[in-house]
Amino acid sequence: MRYIFVMFFHYVKAIHGGFACKRTRQHRHTNMKKKAVFIINLISGTSSKAGVPNLIEQTLDKEKFDYEIAITEYAGHASEIASRAKDNGVDVVVAVGGDGTVNEVARAIVHSNTALGIMPCGSGNGLARHLLLPMNLKKSIEIINQCEIHDLDYGIINGYPFFCTCGMGFDAFVSQKFAEAGKRGPITYAENILREGLKYKPETYVLQDENGTNQYKAFLISCANASQYGNNAYIAPQASMSDGLIDVIIMEPFDVFEAPQISIDMFNKTLDKNSKIKTFRCKKLHIHRSQPGVIHYDGDPVMTGEDIDVELKEKGIKMLVNPFADRSIRKPNALQNAAAELFNQLNIMREDITNQGRHIQAISKVIQKKLNF
């Protein structure tokens, strides 16, 4: 068989009183049970998924859902299963995997009445973490049981949908190396950053949005729909999936002394306060660079040309969210803010001293030349 379905159907007459999903105001309530499909990618992430079907059977609310489980067998299979589920009127499709699996499932159900759920099983789980979903699988099913659905934004980069982040420059380069490495996890990611970071050369980009055109020399440019890459590395701490805007992050070239602080700021949710970071928001963005290269969409790398177009699709996908989420978790605390300000001030002072030293050296050379030293 081309794919394996493990089906569990639980039928109850509608007159016995099913429960409706909670949706945003434009969605009507219904007393009919919901249909759900769980799409499991067995090879995503670093942990086994063998116990997931039994966990779903034990935890999912059968008074709210009839469900079935599908196992993916090849790249792109999750999209095929999700598309078929959408066409069959399934209410909720749950991606059981990492950000790659989430992207495959989500792009098949945009602009439809089928909602995306997530059981995070990847190495980064960027979208799930932004949505403040539990990393514990049993708890993530309990959130699915709440069935609260919001209409949220997504983006497109050169025709490729993304739901968390996309970008070019060093992060796309690392995504490519990460994909080539054949193994997953934060250690592999860190190894690639340390190995390649000091060798990577910044590029020059011309950015055009609704407000005009600007040129930047940048280490990377990231376009964020959600706030983080994954593993709580916040590339765009202020990003929202419901504001109708892309957060554009431009990381300017930095030296070996500045690199640790950039990393600390990313995990402290204070990257936007770093002096090497420029940010703005827009709905559409055109980027030109001098030569073709790699871009990434939700961490998946792809080669593309000199011209790159990024566009936000407002409220284009329905997603199950966590109604109990504490959104203050996304914000830095007072200590993190204070530390970011202190380190930025120290870095500015260091740059001033370095520039003054260069200026003194230049004056010294002129004097020596005039005195024929």
Image (cartoon, helix red, strand yellow):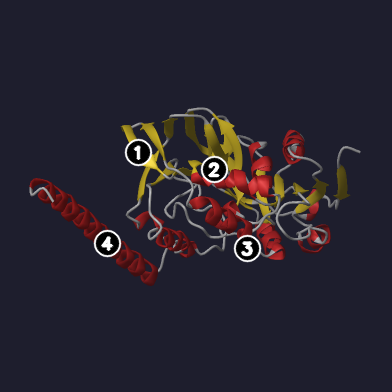
Residue in the picture at 53% in, 50% down: 196
> Which sits earlier in the primary sequence, circle 2 or circle 3?
3
Type of the residue with mark 1: Tyr
Q: Answer yes or no: is residue 321 visible.
A: no
Q: Are marks 4 and 1 in contact (CB under 8 Å)?
A: no
Q: Position of residue 57 (x, y in %)?
A: 82, 59
> Which sits earlier in the primary sequence, circle 2 or circle 4?
2
Element type where label 1 sits in the image = strand
Q: Are marks 2 and 1 in contact (CB under 8 Å)?
A: no
Mark 3 crowdedness (10 Å alpha carbons): few <14, some 14-19, many ≥20: some
Q: Is residue 233 left or right of residue 337?
A: right
> How far separated are the C-alphas under marks 2 and 3?
27 Å
> How far separated are the C-alphas under marks 2 and 4?
30 Å
> Which sits earlier in the primary sequence, circle 3 or circle 1?
3
Type of the residue with mark 2: Ala
Disc 2 versus disc 4: nearer the observer: 4
Q: Are marks 3 and 1 in contact (CB under 8 Å)?
A: no
Element type where label 2 sits in the image = helix
Q: Position of residue 373 (x, y in %)?
A: 13, 51
Q: In this rendering, is residue 365 above or below 79?
A: below
Q: Are marks 2 and 4 in contact (CB under 8 Å)?
A: no
> How far separated are the C-alphas under marks 3 and 1?
38 Å
Residue at the disc numbered 2: 172
Q: Position of residue 180 (x, y in %)?
A: 67, 45
> How far separated are the C-alphas under marks 3 and 4?
41 Å
Q: Is residue 316 left or right of residue 366?
A: right
Residue at the disc numbered 3: 134
Disc 2 versus disc 3: nearer the observer: 2
Q: Position of residue 186 (x, y in %)?
A: 61, 59
Label annotation for residue 216: 1
